Image (cartoon, rainbow, N blue to C red):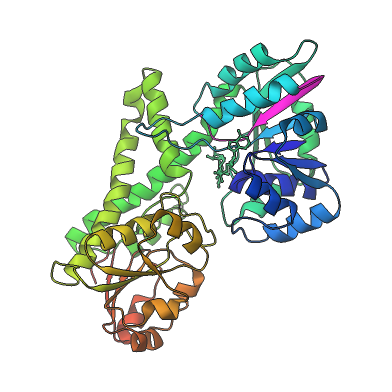
Amino acid sequence: MTVIGTGYLGATHAACMAELGHTVMGVDVDKHKIASLARGEVPFFEPGLPAVLERNIAAQRLSFSTDYAEAAAFASVHFLAVGTPQKRGSYAADLSHVEDVITELVPQLRGKNTIFGKSTVPVGTAAHLQDMANELVAPGASVEIVWNPEFLREGFAVKDTISPDRIVVGHAGTTDVEAIAREIYAQPLSQGTPLLVCDLQTAELVKVAANAFLATKISFINAVSEICEIAGADVVPLAKAIGIDDRIGSKFLGAGLGFGGGCLPKDIRAFMARAGELGADQALTFLREVDAINMRRRDRCVDMAKAAFGGSLLGRRVTVLGCAFKPNSDDVRDSPALSVAGSLSLAGAAVSVYDPQGMDNAKKIFPTLDYAESARAALTEAELVILATEWQEFRDLDPAATAALVSRPYLIDGRNVLDIDAWQAGGWQVKALGRSL
Ligand SMILES: NC(=O)c1ccc[n+]([C@@H]2O[C@H](COP(=O)([O-])OP(=O)(O)OC[C@H]3O[C@@H](n4cnc5c(N)ncnc54)[C@H](O)[C@@H]3O)[C@@H](O)[C@H]2O)c1
C-alpha cells in the first residue's frame, strides 16, 4: 500500500501500517519531509513514532518517495492523507490537495485499485473524487474511492492507529472493499475493534460530526464557565459533578482556553460551510456559537492579563507557558496558547514563551515573540505567568521554587490543572478561567 501525504496523520499511518506487517510506501510532495522520514527521522513530535519508523525502515517494510509513478506501480491500495485546511477567506475546506492527488495518481494506475480516503472532507467529496477518477483512469484500469476517516489523537497517534477504537469504511457498494479493509486491519479487528461499514456520505459525516460534538462539549463547559465567573461559582467542581453522570461523562469537559489545532476549528467551520451549500445552514448555526465561545476564552485570558496590571500591558514582562495547541504535540496550528501570546505581545507586553516541543513551529508563525530555552529561563523576572498548554512539566512546577524566579508571583491558570491551594500557599496570587478565587 501507499500512504499519500506524510504529515501528522500520514506519516503515522504509514509507519503503523508497516508495524502491522504491511509493505508501505509513504509519498509526499515535500522533498525535505520525505528525505527526513527516509532517514528514520520524524519531522514533528509524536511520542513513540520514531521507534516505529526506524524499526520498519530497518525491516524493509517501509519506504518513502516523492514520485507518483513509483507510487502507482508500487501498490493497488492507496491511502489518501493530505491536508484539507481552511480555504483562505472562507469557512470552507480547501480540497485542492486531495484533488491534486487524484489528478497525479489516477492516470498512472494500472489494474484494479482502491483509494482509501483518510483526510477529513466535506460530505460529497468522495463522490466528486470518484467522478474525477472515472474521467482520468487509463483504459483497462479501475479505481474505487472509499472513505475511511481517521480518529487518531496527536500525542496518542501510534496507539490510536495500531489499536483504534473503531474503523469506519464507507463505499458505494461496487467491489469487495470490505474484504480489503478486513485484510488491512486484520490485527485490530482480531482484537475486537468494531468495523462499521456504511455509504460514502455517512463515512465522511461520521468524522465531522464527531469533531463537531467534541468542540460543542468543550464550548458548552466554557460557556458555563463564563457564567461561573460572573456568579461567583467555580467551574472545576461543577464540571466534576456533572461529569460523574455517565450520560455526560468527564472527558472533554475541562474549562479553560478552549480547543485549537489542525482539526477541530477548521472542521466545524467546513461543516457549517458545507451545510450552507446543501441548503441546510440552519442545522448548524449553533456551531457558529461554539466557535465564538471558544474564541472568547482567548480574549478573556488577555483581559485577565490586562487586569493583572490595572488595565495596561505596555512594557510588562509576561511569561506564557506553552504554545502547542495541546500537550504532547508540537502542533501550533490555531493554538489558543500561541494566540494568547501573540495578542499579549500586540498589546505591548514583553512576552516570553516556553514550550517543550512547539517552539520551532511557533517561531514560523510568531517570530517576534521571545522564545526561551527553558521554563526556568522563561519564568525569570516575570511579572505575570500564564499557563496556556497543560504540559506535565508545567503541572509539576513547584510553587515556592517558581515564586523565587519571578519578580511578581501572579499566575493565570488557563487550563485549570494546577493545585490552586498549593500555589496560593506558595505565595502566588492566582486567577483562573471560570473560577472565582
Ligand atoms: N493531525 C491529526 O491529528 C488528524 C486526525 C484526524 C484527521 N486528520 C485529517 O488528516 C488530514 C491531514 O492532516 P495532517 O494533520 O496530517 O496535515 P499535515 O499538514 O501535517 O500533512 C499533510 C501532508 O500532505 C502533503 N501534501 C499536500 N499536497 C500533496 C500532494 N498533492 N501529494 C502528496 N502530498 C501532499 C503535505 O506536504 C503534508 O506533508 C486532514 O484532512 C486532517 O483534517 C488529521
Up/down of 31 relative to 420, above or below: above
Q: Is 268 positioned to the left or the right of 430 in the image?
A: right
Residue 56, position in %: x, y?
A: 80, 53
Which stretch did the figure color magenta? 109-121
Q: Residue at x 38, y 30 (%)?
A: 272
Up/down of 400 relative to 89, above or below: below
Q: Residue at x 69, y 27 (%)?
A: 115
User: Quarter of the image containing the C terminus?
Assistant: bottom left
How many tags in the picture? 0
Image quarter for ligand 1: top right
Q: Is 66 positioned to the left or the right of 19 in the image?
A: left
Residue 314, position in %: x, y?
A: 18, 68
Q: Is residue 164 visible?
A: no
- Quadrant of the image occupied by residue 402: bottom left
Residue 110, position in %: x, y?
A: 80, 20
- Front-lying residue, 322 or 240: 322
Q: Is 195 positioned to the left or the right of 272 in the image?
A: right
